[in-house]
Structures are given as C-alpha cells and as structure tokens.
Amino acid sequence: MSSSSPPPEEPRNPGRIKAILDSLENLQGGRKRKKSDPLDPYLKAARAFPLLHDPLVDLGAVFYDGIKADHEEEHPDDDETPEERLSTGRIYRVNVFRDFVKCIPTISTTISGFEDDPAKLEDFIDALRNTASLARAEDTCKLKDLCPSFLLDDPSKSGAALDPPIIKGQSKSLRGWNHKATARGLCPMVDIMAFDEDPQSYMDLVLNGEKRPPLFKKLPSCLYDESLAAPILKRSGFLRGKPPERTFRAIFTGPLTALDPTSRKGTKQPKGVIHGMTEPMGRAIAYAAIQLILSLSSVEQWSSEVNGLDLYELYLSIVTTLENTNHSWVKETLDYWKKYALKFSWPNFAR
C-alpha cells in the first residue's frame, strides 16, 4: 500500500459542493436521486473500499484519521499523546486513507468544501461508511449460500451435494464445527489427517473446548490445494485451492463464473470491471479468503473473529505477504491466480 501524500487540491467549485450537499439531503431523506448524481463517484469508491482496500477497518475512522493527519500541523490535538498520534493502528488508517483517496480525484476539494459545516462532513463520511458496509454485507449474504458448495470437487456434477445438505436459508448454527464438510474446511491444514481419521471425534473436541480451533499460525484447509500442502511448509498449496478461487470469481466476475470462468450471461458488468480491476490483487484475494471462512462458519453476522481465528490478522498477513513481490512464492501465487482464477474472464468482461 502506498503511503504517499494525497493528490493535490483542485480549484474549489461551490456549485459542485452545493450539489453534493443537496444529494446528501436526498439520500438521508430517502428521496429519489438524479440519474447522474454528484455523489455517485464517491459512493462508487466506497463500494470498492472493502473489496480493494480493507473490509475490516472502519471507513469513518479512516477518513477522520486521514483528514486529521493531513492537517495535523495546523490543528494538533493537545489531548493526544505523541504515542497515540503515532500508534500503529492510526498510521495504518492514514495510509489506507491516502491510498483510497487516489481513487477519487476531487476528494480533497470536496472535503475542504465542508470546512464551514463540520456536521455536513460527518454526514458525507457516514454516507460513505454506510455504502461500504452495505457492499460488504451484500457479498456476505450472497456467498452464504454459495460457498459451502465450493468445498465439493465438482459442484456442477449431477447428484453432487454435501452430506448432510446445507439448504438455502438454513440457520448458520448448523455450519462451522457442527457440520462435517464445513468443519473440515475450517480445520487447520496441519491437522487434516487427524480430522479425516475420525471427523466426529475431532469436531466434538473443538465443540467441547478440549481442542483449540484454528488460530493464525494454523490456517484453515479451505484455503489450500491439499495435493500441494506439506505439514512443515505453511505456504505449500496456500491460496491455491478451488474454494478461494470460486469465491473470488463469485465476487469479482459474477456468481455464474464461480464454477466456470467462461460463463457469461446478462449485460450487467461484474464488480471487478466496475471497480477497474485488471488482474487479481492481493487485497481482493485476501477479501475473498475472509468471506469464504466467514461463510463456512456458524457466525450469523459479520465478525472479525471466527472461533478464535482473528480474521483481521489473517487478512493483513495475506495482504502483507502478497505485496512482497520480490518473494518467489508471491510471484508464483499471483501468476497462478492470473492464469486460473480469472481464466478467460477479463477479456470477455472488459470490452
């Protein structure tokens, strides 16, 4: 992620600021907005935020920390210690902000336009925060009924089904460590042989608290290609499995492409094209991995933790690893994703 300064300010346009304020009022009042609305570029960027920037950090906090950092010399916070100002979390959010605003060329002047009305700035940030949360929630809802079937070798095969079946609309309390297939997907890759020897016994040990579920250092098997996995090599086969590939395509090139990358129906552009993605990005891959794990779990609502597994720690670890482009494993992994995860998709979608 870039930590460079935000783009230079553009000349302030009072007419555009007023149009944005009017659109905010319409949005808050539930009134119909214009076909070409001045808020659209900002809301579009907000929808991309969880997919391409960070699904677990609060967009509001990112904006407040980012704006504060860019005006820190003029408006220092006397109540904040130097350690707090330089906290790792805040530095990260500032960097996310500066990376994010590059997607919106007019954002600097728009923010400046709210100087005389801080309450409206809060409304603006809330609108972006809510839009980002909704985009993430829509993916979570859609994937809830799709991802369990991605555990099957060939879900399109006649008669292919989980045992017992996971039915659409069924409570998620029946998943996680309460279902053999989802439990196996959540089982640490290093323990998969022990799981397969006696699945029910392993599940009971986790449910009874006698065995710890997967932690950060023991990653779920659903993120691996088991034919490549090696007990002593954490990265062998990691992020090469079919479930994360299918989840990624379901999000970025459409549910119909999840099982068949060449499938294309309808005229609606997929999210990857809408948000300008030209190849699989580390943050997008990490986002798909987090959504997959969440969908297999018994957790009913979005959470940063699943049975002791810190999803935020996992997300940042995947991102940090995949952004280390000098590592041979990273190059091989990203080349793999370009070849298989989006095979045939982008040339058809990006026309």
Image: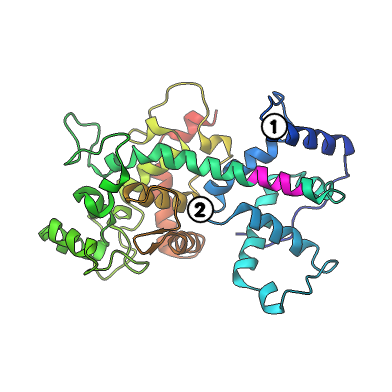
Span colored in magenta: 121-128
Is the residue under label 2 in contact with that under label 1 (CB below 8 Å)?
no
Residue 157, given in percent of the width and then of the height, sits at: 20, 31
Residue 279, given in percent of the width and then of the height, sits at: 50, 44
**Residue at point 69% right, 37% down?**
41
User: Taking 300 as reference, is 111 left or right?
Assistant: right
Q: Is 50 situated above or below 155?
A: below
The residue type indicated by label 1 comes to Gly
Between 228 and 28, the residue placed more toward the observer is 28
The residue type indicated by label 2 comes to Arg
Residue 217, given in percent of the width and then of the height, sits at: 35, 69
Disc 1 to disc 2, how far (Cα)? 34 Å
**Residue at point 57% right, 35% down?**
274
User: Taking 317 as reference, is 30 left or right?
Assistant: right
Q: Residue furthest top?
A: 266
Q: Main secondary structure of the magenta part?
A: helix
Label annotation for residue 283: 2
Mark 1 / mark 2, whichever is N-terminal: 1
User: Taking 4 as reference, is 18 left or right?
Assistant: right
Residue beneath label 1, please? 29
Residue 307, given in percent of the width and then of the height, sits at: 34, 60
Residue 2 shows in this picture = no
Find numbered disc 2 in the image and state the secondary structure of the residue it sits on: helix
